[in-house]
Structures are given as C-alpha cells and as structure tokens.
Amino acid sequence: MPVLSVTRNVYKTTPGREGRQRPQGDDATKETSLVFVNRFTGEAFDDYDDYVEKMKFYLARQWSCKYTGQSGLTFEEALQSEAKAGLYVEGMPGTHVRPALEIVHHNTLNADQLVKRIISTFTAELVPGEQVKVGEDDYIVVGSAAAEQEAAEGEGEKNATDQITSTSNNSNKKFKLIGKGGEVANKMLTLAKELIKRPKHPLNKPMVRSWLYTVASVKVVYDNQPRGARKKNAWFAFPELAKEFSLSDDLPAGLSFKPAQTKKALEAKARAEANLKRKLERAAAKEEAVKKLKREKEIKDEEREKEREKKKLMLQNTTTLKKGSMKYAAYQVLKNVGSEGLSVVDIMQRATEAGLRDFSSTHAAYNKVFGCLCSAPKLFIKVDRGIFALRQESEADLRIIEGAPRTPDERETKMGFNKENTTPPRNTGPRETHMVKVAKAAVCKCEEKVAKAEEVFNEITNTIEQHAKERPRKIEIPSELQWNPELETFTGNSYDRKAIMTHRKWVEEEKSRLAHEAELFVKSRRQEYQKAKSHNKNLLIKATSDLNSAKDNLKKAQKALNRAQSLSLVKSGNFTPDQLTKDKDLQKELEREKLAEERRRKKLEEKEKARLQREKEREERLRMKEVEKLEKKFPLEDNLLVTEIMKLKESNLPVDLPLALPVLEDDVDPTFVQVCIITACLSTFGKLLGMQPMKFHEVLQAVKLPGPTLAGLYRDLLSVLLLDGSQHPSGLRRIRRWVYAMTSEWGSIAWPDVLSRYVLAKPYVDEKVRRAAEELQEKEYQSISYEDHAHLLQFLLDDIVETKIVHEEIDKWQEERVDFVSQKREDKMEMRRKERERQEAVKEKRRKEEEEKKKRREEFEKLKEEKREKGEDVSQMELDEVEEDEEIDEEERFQIPEEKLEFKGNENDRKAVLAHRRWIETEKARLQREYEAYNKEKQKKQREISAKLKEERKVLEAEALAHSKRQEVFDRELAKRPVRMNPMGMDRNKCKYYWNVAGQKAAVYAQNPDNGDWKCFSDETTFDRFLHALDPRGKR
C-alpha cells in the first residue's frame, strides 16, 4: 500500500454521506440511482462533491513507494512502483528478524537512515543460522566464538543476537560453523570472519524497507535534555512482535512520552496555579458580595414596592383637588348646598361671582364643567338631568393642593401685561450683538462675585471687630473638675489607722488630679481662642485677596464690554472709530476688525455657496444610496418579486412591475429536438469514437431519407457498442456472434437484424424504441418512419455514453473542469481581495482625516470657550481660525499690509520719503517673485497629483483587463469540455431556453417544465419583447 509522504488527516467521508458499492447480482438491475466510482480503489459515492474530493486526495503528489522510497508520486504511480518493485523484493530472512527488530525498536532514525543502519550492521556481522561458504563447502553459522568463551568464564549467558547487534568491528572476531551436507556434514569449525564468505548479501534496501513498515510504526517521543525537551519520532515494534521476541516496553534513558519540564517551567506552573486559585477566590468573594448586594437591593425594592402600593391605595381612596381648577370651584359652590344640588349653569354662575373661576373666556365651558363633574363620581353625584350635588361621605377623603393660576387675568398678569395693554412688552432699545451680550453677562457675573466678596469681607470684619471689643472673660472651670470639701470627711472606723491614712492619701491624689485636669481645661480653652483668632485673621486675608481679584476681573470685564460695544457700533456702520474713542490703539483695532468683518462676510458668502453645493451633492448621494439600497434587495425569487415590488410601491419608491412574458405559439416537432440532440452528441464524441462528425442537415436528411449514410451510422454505433459489450445483459457468446455477423461480408445486410436483437434483448427499454425495433425486424429500414429512426439513434447514443471509453473521457473532462473552475474562482477571489484592500486603505485614510478634523474641532471649541470666558465675541469665529495648516488668502499673503504703505515719518524729510517709496517698489517686486514661485510650485504639485491618479487609474484598468482576459480563457477552456447541454437560462415560469444547439441559430427554443412541450420564436419583435420582459431583479 502506498505511504503518505507528509503527515495529514486521511480522507473521511461526511457522516451520513458515505459512498456505497454498486449492487451485485439481482439488485444490480433494480438500482437506478447514479453513483460515482473511484477507479483506484473501487469506492462508490452518491455525492459528486465527495467523489471529487477523494479523487483530488489520490491524485495529489503526496505518496511514496514503500519498496523504493521514491516520493512525490500520485496514488496510482505509487501502486505501479510497488507492483513493479514487488516482483523483485524477497521476504526478510527469518534468521535476521529478531536482531533487526532489536535495532528498530526505540530507534529515533528516519526510515532511510534506519534501513542503511540495518544493512551496514549485518554487512559486518554474521547471524546464527545464516548459510555461508568456506572454500567450496557449505556451512551454517552457529554463533560467535567470543560469546561462548565469555559464557564459559562465568560472566553470564548471553544471547547470540545480543552479540550480533553490538557494534564490534574487530577483524580477529571468530565464528563457530557447522557443516551442511556432503563430506563436511556436522563438522564443527571455528574461523575468523575474513575466511568466511557469503554467496550473496542476505539483505537489500527494498526488502528491509518493505519489512520495516510491516513490523513497526512511528510514535512521537521527547528527548529530555538539560536545556529542555526536543520532539522526536521513534520506531516501535508492533505489540504482538514485541511480546513474541521479548522486547522491552521501557523507553531508553533520556526518552519519554511527555516533555520534561525545567525548574523555571515548574515554578511558572506553580505560580499560574496559585494565581488561578487567587482569581477563583476573588471571583467567589465578588460573586458572594454581588449576591449580598442583590439580596439587599431586593429587600429595599420590596419595601419600596410596599410603600408605593400603600401610597397608591391611599390615593385611590383620596380625591385630590387643585386650587383654581373646575373641580375645586364646583366643590366650593356645592359645599354649602344641600342634597338638592345645582344645575351646571348655576354652578358656573356662582363660581364666577365668588371669584373661584372665570368661565366667560372659556371655550365650551358648559361641556367642560359637565364632563368634569361626571369624571369624579366619588366626589359628585348626579341628582337629576343636568343637576349635580356633593357626595357627603367624600369629605373625609379629600385633599386640596396649591395649583397654578387658571384664570386669563392671572395668566396675563404672570406674563407681564394686562387687558389695558394687550401687546406684550418689547425691547425697544438697539439690538445687541452676541459679543455684547456675553460681555454684559460677564460684567454681571463679575459684579455678583464682587458683591459676594464684599459681603464675606464685611462679615469677617464685623466678626473680628466684635471679638476685639469683647473683654477677656474669666474661664470658668466646670463643676466636675472642682473639689468637693465634703469628700475630705472620713466616714469609716475612726480607730482603723490604716483606713484613715489610705483615705488621706486618696484625697491628696484626687485634689492633685482635679487641679491638673482644670489646668489642662484652661489651657485648651485659651488655645481654642487663639486658634479662632488666627482663623479669622486668615479668613480676612483670603477675603481681601478674593475681593481684589473680583474687582480686577470686573475692570477687565467692563473694558471688554466697552470694546465689544465699540466693535458692535463700528460693525453696524453708524459710527467710525474716531467718533467712539480717542485711544489710538483701540481705533486701529476697530479698523482691523472692520476690515476683518468685511472679509469674514465674503468668506461666509462663499461658504454658504459651498454649503448649498454640498447639500445638493448630499441629496444626490442620498438618492443614489436609496437606489443602491433598493437594488440590494434583488435578486429575489420570481414568485416573491411582484409581492415585494408592490410593497416598495406603497413606500413611494421608484420601482416598476416586471413586464409580462410573450406567449410563444410556434410548436416544435419533438423529432426535431431529438435530431438536435443526436447531432450534438455525435459532434461531441464522434472523433473520440473514430467516427466522422455530421452536421444537423446531414443527420436530418439521413433520418428522413434513409439510405447508405444512415446505414453506415447505425453500423458504426453498433460496432462501438458490441466491441465494448459492458452495457448489454447478453452473454459474450451472443455478442461475439453479433460482431462476427457485423464484420462478415453479409454485414451490410445483417445489421438491421443485429440492431433489433440488440434492442429487444435489453430490459426496461422504452416502448417507442421497442416498437421501432420490432418494425425493423418486420420491414426494411427504408420503410419505417423517421420518428422511429430518431428513437433508435438516440437509444444507441445513450448506450454509447455509458461505455468505458466515453466514461473515462467524461471523467477526464470533469477533473479538468474542476481545476479550471477552482482557478477561475481563485482568480475572482484574488481580484476581490485586492479591491477590498484598496477600499480598506481609502477608509483608513478617511478615518485618519476625520480624527484630525475632530481633534481640531475640539481645540477650536476649547479656544472658543476660553474667549467666551474673557468676554470676547465668538459668534463670528470659524473653525478655520484654529487649523494648523491654514492656507492664508493669496491676495493678503503676497500684498504689502495697508499700515506699511502709509508713510508715518516726517513728511518734510524728502530723503526718508524717497527711501520709503523705494522700499515699497522693492517689496512689491519681491512679493511678485514669491507669488510666481508659489504658483509654479502649486501647479507642479497639482500635476504630480493628477499624474499619480492617472497612473493608479491605469494600473486598475490593466488589472481589470487582465482579469477579464483570464476569465475569458477559463470560459473557453470550460466550453471545450462540455459535460451536459446547459440552457441559456430560465424565466420566471421555469421554462428553459436553448440556442445554437447543433448549430441551429435561426430560432430560440423553449421547453415547458410541466409537460415537456417545445416552442420557438424567430422574429425580432418577439425577441425584443422577450428581452424587455426579462427582469434582472429575479433569480432566474
């Protein structure tokens, strides 16, 4: 059996989809399902994908010959190599099995090195039982003379094979021999190795290699070294052989099935286990804490739910009235009325008179009051039609709360105007800019801070003054620290001197203790007084600094307000800087602001235009996205297409229903279709079978006008089928008779009889074919109908497709098609991968740009907030002001500032005036040169960018062109290897459409899936209607 050259998982069929063998005997005729048979191993598969996968596995160059060791072969080549080498490979001599096994067992060499080792070992050594020659006589080796000598000396009996496997190359080594037959029978000799000759070497490489794979297998072991374990492959004799020859199961020293761990690894493992234990303990503690918190939360939630239910129950039994509401007014009116009640009109009138509610301005007041009284059945009761009274038992469950003003007068008063002044107050002063408002808000804020700081300062000053005016008080010692003289009286036995002395001692100690504690108390009170004094002093210092800081901030805010008001007036155009201030610096600043405001206005206009343009583009993109999103829904199943389109039309999306398919009325003769199939089959397999391909009109003429051409076609097809003979149930004897009849001189006459017998002898033949064969027996072949000839030809071609030669060719085509399809798919995947990489690069670039914009936007917001806190106007600030790589306007960049154009020196100094003029001319020339250089550099960069884009576009176009050419090559190769005739496609009714079948291009043929009828159309009008009716949104 060939050996895998690389380590890999052996092919396994998918569970539930295992291949099955062809049925044998009687079951072979009953089996009608299609199976795929592997020609190497005879395996059969129901699933074609499993069959192709297994064929790829066997055709891969990953096998090696177990006799010669040649690798890089397919499974079939390895089998052939083994079959060829096996003719010359002998079996392993029995005398060498045990010593060779001892060399193999637990050896870590690879197969080639191990084979060389075994052969080299037995080249220098002789094995007991091996046949040798001494001169012309035959002898048999008994053993080594040195082994017997050691056994005689008492060093322990050793096996002769142990001596053989030892690596001894001593030239003086002697062997003991015994004669074999003839004059030297049973004659004992002891000779040196040099005097003993072999007829031939008992071993060779193919023999040892073949034997090696039958007695041992490879397992993974580890060579444990001080620096760590190394992974190796060791040979192990099969268990039954190891037991038979008593081979040790223990591994040699230094080898083990598990890698040895170093001290460092063991320590790391212990640390990992300890860390895992700690982590588990922490997780358990955390889980316990979470459970505890969860339990506490559940308890709290239960208590809260109980409180909520309690409040809800209380509110259900309580009626709440809001002052100023309709219910409150009705309650106050009906409270003083008995059970007779009042009508709704009376209630409204009395409520208005009592000032409880004004219903004069209420729209549909009667309906609202009536609905209000009906909606509170617990408070009001309906006595009669339109008459309501107060329910007496509801007074105990009544709750009144304060409410918002409900009358129109109250609302108008709250809003700040009354009936006399029906117009709300308006700000009649000049309109303030955002910068002025911010500055005023900053001034108000600073004034509030100053007021608070002054208030704190005054409070601390008053506190200090009060403390200074107060005289120091004498510190009163608490009573518990004062001595009680009554404790000095001894109440015990006056004759007990020891007790008296003890009492006196306690009195002295207690007095000293109280005196000490009183001293500490006085000291602590003095310290507290000093601390309060120092604390007040520190507070005064802090309040003074806060007050001064607030006043400074107020001055800055007032100055900013003045500047903001001036800028606002200047920007309005009603005032000039000279009219607002006499400060030269402020006047220059106002002039600059005025110019900046004009530039800003122009820039805003340009930005507005750009924004409108972006809005247009955005709307277009959204429309395109909507269309793209709509297109992504398709293709759909054709039965669901109309339903989905109707849903989309309800959403006002621009979609149209698919057009109706044209009705085909031209019928096609079934025999015409059969002739097309016959012609296509002959053109596909004609050259393979040694037949001359025929065109459609030739086949049609031969079928409709039977003659020598049709007879020759029948004879050629019968010859192929009879020579193969695998598809016919008749015996070989009958087939030989038919072949003899076809090849004899009577073949031109006998073929109709052979054909009819061939057809009638097969079981399960279609009734039409059987009837045609019977007519062929009864009549001349020219007399039967052309439909019968078509049935017979199609039957013969169906059998030819099942012959071995055609099957092999189809299998070859299928394998080649699989290779081309996989190459085509890989090419498409590679193209898509490159496209995805380009898209990812563009997205990454766009993401970085967005991050930079976000960062600049955050910096801009931060700067804007800082300016707003300083009281500056930030309403006109734009994001471009904080961009790091801001491009300055070219007109400003390459022009001399206006303040430098004006001569500010002494106008009477002619020399200075001329120097200023010369400087202006020189500066203008320099700026012009810089502007030209800047334009050149800018144009150069634009050219480089356009060239780069053009080059990238060329590369993409070249890749797309190469990809399309490769796809066309694959399509052409696939078209050269047809497996079956595929239709052009199917319509929504699952009708199949064919064109250019057997060279018929004059019409398009359609097959109905329900009854198999054929239709066709050949006019351009029907073809155009058919093309327009095909909808790409459907799957077919």
Image (cartoon, rainbow, N blue to C red):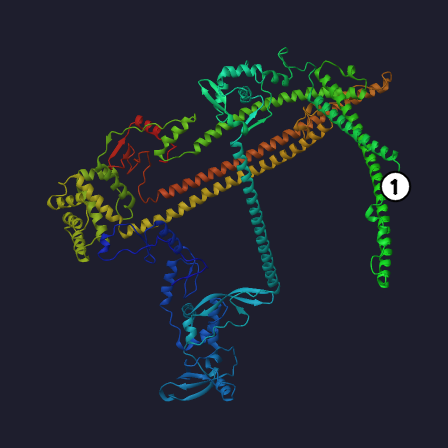
Q: Position of residue 865 (x, y in %)?
A: 69, 30
Residue found at x 86% / y 19%: 911
User: Which of the 4 image quarters holds residue 90?
Assistant: bottom left
- Seen from the viewer's position, the closer of residues 615 and 431 is 431
- In the shown orientation, is residue 576 left or right of residue 660? right
Q: Residue furthest top?
A: 420
- Image quarter (top left, top right, bottom left or bottom right) of the N terminus: bottom left
- Position of residue 766 relative to residue 724, above or below, is above
Residue flagged by tag 1: what amino acid is it? Answer: Lys
User: Which of the 4 image quarters holds residue 128?
Assistant: bottom left
Q: Position of residue 414 (x, y in %)?
A: 63, 19
Tag 1 residue: 474
- In the shown orientation, is residue 227 left or right of residue 717? right
- Image quarter (top left, top right, bottom left or bottom right) of the C terminus: top left
- In the shown orientation, is residue 378 left or right of residue 743? right
**Can residue 147 be seen by looking at this rendering?**
yes
- Position of residue 851 relative to residue 238, above or below, is above
User: Which of the 4 image quarters holds residue 536?
Assistant: top right
- Seen from the viewer's position, the closer of residues 336 and 731 is 336
Query: Crowding at label 1, few (<14), some or many (≥20) Cα neighbours within 10 Å?
Result: few
Helix, strand or loop at mark 1: loop
- Position of residue 1017 relative to residue 19, above or below, is above
- Seen from the viewer's position, the closer of residues 936 and 437 is 437
- Seen from the viewer's position, the closer of residues 281 and 483 is 483
**Can residue 883 be seen by looking at this rendering?**
no
Q: Position of residue 255 (x, y in %)?
A: 53, 69
